[in-house]
């Protein structure tokens, strides 16, 4: 059911002799991007329509073997640290294609903006296209190349950074370095952000608003280890000053919700915590809690039991199970889109939060910690805890240096704050795939066990931490990653 076709796989479907004529003629004048409104409509497709959540979560240390349950390949193969051979929804290859399809839409929009008779009236469209292009490439280089390291980025292989619309069928792509890709991302991000106009969007949360763009910038510079810029961009997200109002009310309002209500609100555009949402074709909504390799009681206790505040996570009050070990927190819910009005078949989708206020707060706390601003980092952690700990009381649950040092058995406060942030993020984003990013950034080893007693390990230097370039990409001359 793969509907996203990469440029190079297009070559297999049409004869080259007819391509030139096909590409020279517009099949319908309605496809001409001759107005800002038409470019805006195109930009609705400039966000990856595929999801990374299934394979990223399955690679992480958030999952275990239940012994029984479904065995979808996009979940099973990552659990065993195998290259995923499936190219359907939720696979790395599907996500690769979705990202480059988003890039293609962004590049087409940018060309239309450039060639318009009045380019100034397309400035906000240009800004959104640049941010969308930067984001898709950032996600690609994160998954399919080595994580950014200032010492090796100039030699580590990156991914193709595509900046022009495709007008020929056979075209080879060059894998430059991770440093080059990061430079291009930064260029697009810095150029695009000031051009954004939030008033243009009918549903802002489905587009790069200034808040979402600043959240992206904060994440990008965290990965790049430019911590002062992380703080600067995060501060822009919280410029109103009322951070708590942007955080999910887990220990108050959320505690009163039924599972159905949780599913309906978590990835909704009206939820203040959501800064950018993407509609993705995915089976994760139906598979993530019944699959054999998933969130178990042992992982529940490991992730959601004790924490440095001494209080109880509100997450546990919204933790449900369909059977003995099929645990889930109602977040990602599937909805079905029919292929036509009268059709009985269609495609399952899930709405995924790409950026949230919680992540921005964590990124700022981590950056301040690295900068030595431990007081600011603790302030952000306490703001977060005040919305997550059941019956929160500052006098009882406030996070202090002594609590951190005691809980983690360290006298190094900066190290203890970092451990606190990583643990809080793991609890916050469980079943959303976000843990994998921290595993990559900090070289955290992952060990998976099977019910039969087998052990599978992913060390800090294991080459399998970098996802394999899809085999189809070899048609475009792209080298695969070493194994």
Image (cartoon, rainbow, N blue to C red):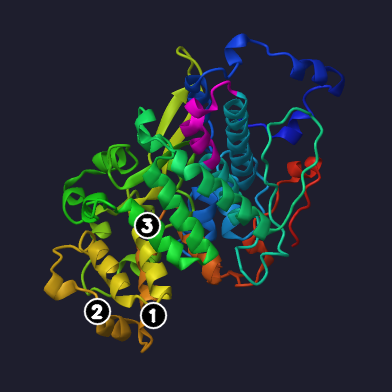
Q: Are marks 1 and 3 in contact (CB under 8 Å)?
A: no
- Crowdedness near tag 3: few (<14), some (14–19) or many (≥20) residues, C-alpha within 10 Å: many
For marks 3 and 2, give the CA distance: 23 Å
Q: Earlier in the sequence, mark 3 or mark 2?
A: 3
For marks 1 and 3, give the CA distance: 20 Å
* Numbered mark located on residue 234 in the image: 3
Judge from the rendering whether residue 13 lies leftward or rightward of residue 282; answer left or right: right
Looking at the image, which residue is at 68% across and 41% down? Answer: 162
Judge from the rendering whether residue 293 lies leftward or rightward of residue 179; answer left or right: left
Query: For mark 2, what is the residue?
Result: 400
Q: What range of the chain is rendered magenta?
A: 116-130
Of the pair 256 and 211, the residue shown nearer to us = 211
Looking at the image, which residue is at 54% across and 34% down? Answer: 46
Q: Are marks 2 and 1 in contact (CB under 8 Å)?
A: no
- Crowdedness near tag 2: few (<14), some (14–19) or many (≥20) residues, C-alpha within 10 Å: some
Which quarter of the rendering shows the C terminus?
Answer: bottom right
For marks 2 and 1, give the CA distance: 12 Å
Identify whether 194 is placed above or below 315: above
Q: Position of residue 471 (x, y in %)?
A: 75, 45
Q: Nearer the viewer, mark 3 or mark 2?
A: 3
Query: For mark 1, what is the residue?
Result: 414
* Numbered mark located on residue 183 in the image: none
State the image quarter where residue 156 is shown.
bottom right
Of the pair 33 and 304, the residue shown nearer to us = 33
Q: Position of residue 472 (x, y in %)?
A: 75, 41
Residue positioned most to the bottom: 411
Q: Nearer the viewer, mark 1 or mark 3?
A: 3
Q: Position of residue 189 (x, y in %)?
A: 52, 48
Q: Earlier in the sequence, mark 2 or mark 1?
A: 2
- Please tell me whether residue 118 belongs to the stretch shown in magenta: yes
């Amino acid at each position: 059911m793969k509907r996203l076709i990469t440029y190079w796989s297009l070559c297999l479907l049409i004869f080259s002799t007819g391509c030139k004529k096909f590409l020279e003629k517009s099949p319908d004048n309605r496809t001409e991007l001759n107005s800002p409104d038409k470019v805006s409509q195109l930009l609705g497709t400039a966000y990856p329509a595929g999801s990374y959540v299934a394979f990223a979560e399955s690679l992480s240390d958030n999952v275990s073997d239940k012994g029984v349950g479904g065995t979808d390949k996009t979940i099973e193969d990552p659990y065993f640290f195998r290259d995923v051979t499936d190219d359907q929804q939720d696979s790395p290859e599907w996500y690769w294609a979705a990202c480059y399809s988003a890039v293609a839409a962004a590049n087409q929009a940018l060309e239309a903006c450039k060639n318009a008779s009045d380019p100034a009236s397309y400035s906000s469209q240009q800004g959104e296209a640049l941010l969308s292009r930067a984001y898709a490439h950032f996600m690609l280089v994160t998954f399919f190349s080595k994580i950014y390291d200032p010492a090796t980025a100039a030699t580590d292989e990156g991914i193709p950074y595509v900046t022009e619309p495709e007008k020929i069928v056979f075209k080879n792509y060059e894998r430059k370095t991770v440093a080059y890709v990061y430079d291009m991302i930064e260029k697009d991000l810095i150029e695009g952000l000031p051009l954004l106009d939030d008033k243009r969007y009918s549903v802002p949360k489905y587009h790069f608003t200034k808040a979402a763009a600043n959240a992206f910038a904060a994440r990008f510079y965290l990965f790049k280890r430019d911590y002062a810029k992380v703080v600067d961009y995060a501060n822009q997200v919280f410029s109103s000053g009322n951070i708590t109002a942007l955080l999910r009310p887990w220990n108050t309002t959320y505690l009163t919700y039924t599972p159905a209500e949780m599913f309906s609100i978590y990835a909704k555009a009206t939820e203040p915590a959501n800064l950018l949402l993407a509609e993705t074709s995915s089976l994760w909504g139906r598979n993530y809690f019944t699959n054999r390799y998933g969130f178990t009681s042992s992982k529940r206790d490991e992730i959601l039991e004790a924490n440095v505040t001494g209080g109880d996570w509100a997450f546990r009050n919204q933790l449900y199970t369909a059977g003995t070990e099929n645990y889930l927190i109602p977040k990602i819910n599937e909805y079905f889109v029919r292929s036509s009005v009268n059709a009985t078949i269609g495609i399952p989708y899930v709405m995924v939060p790409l950026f949230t206020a919680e992540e921005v707060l964590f990124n700022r706390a981590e950056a301040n910690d690295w900068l030595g601003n431990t007081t600011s980092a603790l302030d952000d952690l306490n703001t977060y805890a005040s919305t997550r700990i059941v019956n929160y009381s500052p006098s009882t649950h406030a996070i202090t240096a002594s609590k951190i040092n005691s809980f983690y058995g360290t006298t190094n406060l900066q190290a203890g704050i970092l451990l606190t942030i990583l643990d809080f993020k793991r609890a916050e984003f469980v079943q959303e795939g976000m843990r994998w990013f921290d595993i990559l950034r900090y070289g955290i080893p992952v060990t998976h066990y099977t019910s039969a007693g087998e052990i599978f390990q992913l060390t800090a230097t294991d080459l399998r931490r970098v996802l394999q370039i899809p085999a189809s990409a070899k048609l475009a001359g792209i080298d695969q990653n070493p194994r």
